[in-house]
Amino acid sequence: MTPATIRIIRDEHAALAAMLRSILLLLEQHRRDATLPDFAALRAMLFYVDEFPEQRHHKKETELLFAKLRAKTPLSRELLDRLDEEHGQGERRIRELEHALLGFEMMGEARRAAFEAAAERYVDFYLAHMAVEEREILPLAERVLDARDWAELDAAFGENRDPLTGHPPDDVYRALYTRIVNTVPAPIGLGPAGGNRNRAD
């Protein structure tokens, strides 16, 4: 039986991947239509990435899952070090992307290309990072960790409660979740495919 931690990590990865791909799809559509995106929706999406994956998901992977793997096996230590380093880069990378979005919002068309390039770099980085974890680290964990390890991990990861993985949002995040769901198109939300139709003059 697959440990709950593995399912939670995969579910959170899937939610994040959908969010990141939705950002690129929105940008592509607005570029094609020569319209400006809904900057409030983009800010909400990046805030979600910062609040949930960066602050909760990564921290528990590094401090709990990776630490247990290092204690149990010498395998993949260099890879774990690299993934930890990437976790450490996450906060800087999201701040850079948020700054690029602010530049686009304040400066208009002159900063569109810079933000789109920064978004593509960030999405590529994140998707590759998650793919390595799922391909290399999660199978290793299933092989070497024992029932006591999984009980501790399951309790910790079970507290994450990411609303984009099907959990009811905490009161403090309800407005953020509602904004994302109502303004972002599928697969993340229920918003219109076109979003903000303002022309980019």
Image: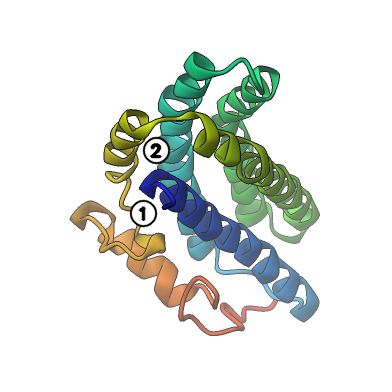
Between 88 and 83, the one nearer to me in the picture: 83
Q: x, y (%) of residue 145?
A: 45, 30
Q: Which quadrant is home to the C terminus?
A: bottom right
Label 2 environment density (alpha carbons within 10 Å; few <14, some 14–19, many ≥20)? some
Between 52 and 195, the one nearer to me in the picture: 52
Helix, strand or loop status at disc 1: loop
Does 167 sit left or right of 136 as displayed? left
Q: Quadrant of residue 86?
A: top right
Residue at x 27%, y 60% (from the top left corner): 169
Residue at x 56%, y 40% (from the top left corner): 138
Q: x, y (%) of residue 151?
A: 29, 36
- Check contact, mark 2 vs mark 1: CB within 8 A: yes
Q: Amino acid at mark 1?
A: Asp
Q: Is residue 26 above or below residue 112?
A: below
Q: x, y (%) of residue 96?
A: 63, 37
Between 34 and 69, the one nearer to me in the picture: 69
Residue at x 57%, y 24% (from the top left corner): 88
Q: Earlier in the sequence, mark 2 or mark 1?
A: 2
- Picture disc at residue 56: 2
Q: Is residue 201 visible?
A: no
Q: Is residue 150 visible?
A: yes
Q: Quadrant of residue 36?
A: bottom right
Q: Is residue 62 above or below residue 9?
A: above
Q: Is residue 79 above or below residue 9?
A: above
Q: Amino acid at mark 2?
A: Arg
Helix, strand or loop status at disc 2: helix
Residue at x 51%, y 72% (from the top left corner): 184
- Label 1: which residue? 162
Label 1 environment density (alpha carbons within 10 Å; few <14, some 14–19, many ≥20)? many
